[in-house]
């Protein structure tokens, strides 16, 4: 098997060469790829920066001659994804690893994000212990902290790089048993809707579908959206739309304003529910914005503080949900569990607020042009979960 060792070899060539040697010692081939934009590479690459730049018909030498380092980095961030994707498409590499600081991490992960889910990708980075969302995106890039800077070989860096080389070799050696015979359904879930989704998933699986469940944490919603848009999905069970509450309130688990757009772009049948729209997610208690201090809050755990959405916010959320559903040309239905949209919004629980829930349901009915069905049930009841699953099956059948 061949592993691409990708990086800025003008500044971190010796570190990449060290990893390359370790991979070769494991019995694998190495393709050293230079993404450098400064001086000459410290080691001889298999693929030069000029070959990478040629993937987008770019004269990289002219940028170097101008001593435009910023322009070089921008150009390479466009060329590297194209070049690496081509290598994967042609079956020339089986995995990729890179080492870097800020610039190297940005370049390498931009290329890695274009590769398929499941393709081994490992980034050893000085930034791996911080917020890595913009580096990882919606792909399965493994981020490994370098502990020390990627600047020379010492007892710490050698240890980390050795483990990293072993990790990427293990990834490419692992055999994945793939089964593509069952059509896919995606579902959104939160801790507060787990029981509902588990029950619904069993119904869908018994009907011959494979169910992929995504945690509605912002990244989870975006990842689900990207899969829907790819056209690989037969149906959408979006019963946990809580990320829209975070988007509206500027909280931490937003998936962005494009959340729920993919079903329309792909024309996929969908069943939607306002699951967990009673809550917006913030971090530790002290991170809650001051303007919300007099609101109904719930400490989910020391790292998560929940804010109860009020009637005005719920009305806006109901309208948004309806408008997203209206945009889908494929068969779509909204199901309202009127007794509770989460565990903690049930009667007797911390977020029970009949007026806010009524505003949510009323707005859905007012703005929705698709079918809307009310159930006198809690979202996690067996009745509601099974109804949602059977409704999706009927919508899929009606489109076929």
Image: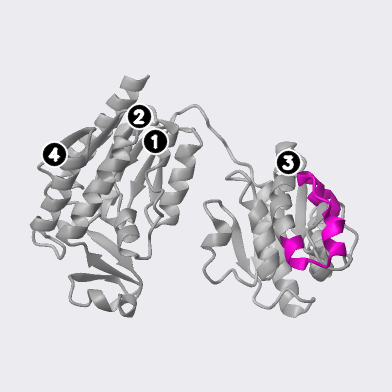
Give the number of the mark in front: 3 or 2: 2
Residue plotted at (19% across, 51% down) = 341
Label 1–label 2 contact, CB within 8 A: yes
Please give the residue where the numbered disc 2 appears in the rendered image. 329
- Specify which label sits upstream in the sequence, 2 or 4: 2
Quick one: SS at disc 1?
helix
Quick one: SS at disc 2?
loop
Distance from the alpha carbon under mark 2 to that under mark 4? 22 Å
Residue 70: say if magenta: yes
Quick one: SS at disc 3?
helix
In this view of the protein, can residue 153 be seen by the observer?
Answer: yes
Distance from the alpha carbon under mark 3 to that under mark 2? 34 Å
Distance from the alpha carbon under mark 3 to that under mark 1? 30 Å
**Magenta span:** 49-73
Please give the residue where the numbered disc 1 appears in the rendered image. 264
Mark seen at residue 150:
none
Whether residue 147 sits left or right of residue 320 in the image: it is right
Quick one: SS at disc 4?
strand
């Amino acid at each position: 098997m061949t592993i691409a060792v990708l990086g800025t070899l003008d500044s971190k060539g010796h570190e990449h060469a060290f990893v390359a040697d370790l991979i070769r010692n494991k019995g694998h081939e190495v393709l050293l790829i230079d993404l450098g934009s400064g001086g000459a590479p410290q080691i001889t690459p298999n693929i030069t920066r000029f070959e990478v730049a040629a993937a987008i018909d770019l004269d990289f030498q002219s940028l170097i001659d101008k001593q435009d380092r910023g322009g070089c980095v921008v150009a390479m961030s466009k060329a590297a994804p194209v070049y690496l994707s081509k290598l994967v498409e042609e079956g020339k590499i089986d995995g990729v690893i890179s080492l870097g600081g800020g610039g190297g991490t940005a370049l390498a992960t931009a290329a890695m994000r274009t590769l398929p889910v499941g393709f081994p990708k490992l980034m050893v980075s000085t930034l791996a212990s911080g917020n890595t969302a913009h580096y990882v995106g919606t792909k399965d890039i493994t981020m490994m902290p370098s502990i020390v800077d990627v600047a020379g070989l010492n007892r710490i860096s050698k240890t980390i790089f050795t483990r990293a080389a072993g990790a990427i070799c293990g990834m490419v050696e692992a055999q994945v048993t793939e089964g593509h015979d069952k059509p896919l359904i995606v579902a959104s879930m939160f801790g507060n809707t787990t029981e509902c989704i588990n029950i619904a998933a069993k119904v869908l699986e018994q009907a011959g579908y494979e169910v992929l469940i995504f945690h509605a944490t912002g990244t989870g919603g975006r990842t689900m959206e990207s899969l829907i848009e790819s056209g690989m999905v037969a149906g959408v069970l979006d019963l946990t739309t809580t990320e829209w509450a975070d988007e509206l309130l500027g909280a931490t688990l937003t998936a962005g304003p494009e959340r729920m757009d993919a079903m329309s772009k792909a024309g996929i049948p969908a069943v939607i529910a306002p699951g967990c729209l009673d809550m917006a997610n913030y971090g530790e208690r002290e991170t809650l914005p001051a303007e919300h201090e007099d609101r109904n809050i719930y400490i989910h755990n020391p790292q998560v503080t929940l804010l109860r959405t009020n009637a005005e916010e719920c009305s806006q959320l109901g309208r948004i949900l309806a408008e997203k559903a209206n945009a889908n040309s494929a068969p779509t239905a909204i199901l309202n569990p009127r007794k509770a949209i989460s565990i903690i919004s049930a009667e007797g629980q911390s977020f029970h607020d009949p007026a806010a829930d009524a505003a949510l349901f009323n707005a859905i009915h007012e703005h929705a042009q698709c079918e809307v069905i009310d159930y006198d049930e809690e979202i996690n009841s067996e009745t509601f979960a099974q109804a949602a699953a059977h409704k999706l099956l009927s919508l899929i059948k009606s489109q076929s």
